[in-house]
Amino acid sequence: MELNEIKYAGQPPIDAYGPGFFRVHGVVQDGLLAILPSGMIAWDGLSDWQAVIAARPEYDVIFVGMGADIAPMPAAAKKLLDKANIPYEIMATPVSCRTYNVLLSEGRRVAIVALPV
């Protein structure tokens, strides 16, 4: 089997995650995570969608990590994303991080917001 190093162009990959933190491109970030194709942004959680909606032309889908386990997203958040015609996938945070990295490595236009595990 041949192993190849994955190259990411521009947007940073998620290197790791754990209780209350994410490591993105070698830098540890405590708390919430939001990465758009233009870079990391401040995100205050499931009631804060203004910057994510404004950046919509940059990405084709956003992954929403709901923590250690998959959980329903608040109806108000779903309504905002649906109204803005933003495709989203709700997942547990570990799955959303892995999926984000895979699609990013394929050169896809993706974004992620995630609650820590």
Image (spheres, rainbow, N blue to C red):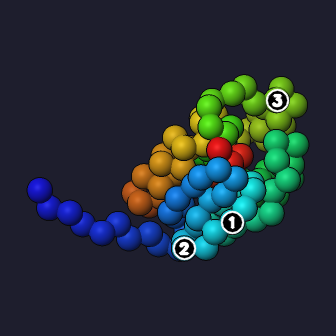
For the residue marked with disc 2, what is the amino acid? Gly
The residue that appears at 60% across and 42% down in the rendered structure is: 93
Q: As drawn, is 77 to the left or to the right of 6? A: right
Q: Earlier in the sequence, mark 2 or mark 3?
A: 2
Q: Earlier in the sequence, mark 1 or mark 3?
A: 1
Q: CB under 8 Å between callouts 2 and 1? A: no
Residue annotated with mark 1: 29
Instruction: Using the rendered view, name the quadrant where residue 70 is placed.
Output: top right
| Comparing labels 2 and 3, the label whose residue is closer to the camera | 2
Residue annotated with mark 2: 26
Of residues 18 and 52, which is closer to you in this image?
Answer: 18
Of residues 52 and 19, which is closer to you in this image?
Answer: 19
Q: Residue furthest front?
A: 19
Q: Height in image: 82 above or below 33?
A: above
Q: Height in image: 23 above or below 96?
A: below
* Circle 3 crowding by C-alpha within 10 Å: few under 14, some 14–19, many from 20: few
For the residue marked with disc 1, what is the amino acid? Gln
Q: CB under 8 Å between callouts 2 and 3? A: no
Instruction: Using the rendered view, name the quadrant where residue 7 is placed.
Output: bottom left
Tell me how far mark 1 sits from mark 3, CA to CA. 24 Å
Q: Height in image: 104 above or below 39?
A: above
Of residues 90 and 55, which is closer to you in this image?
Answer: 90
Residue 58 in view, yes or no = no
Q: Residue furthest left?
A: 1
Q: Which mark is residue 74?
A: 3
Q: Secondary structure at mark 1?
A: strand
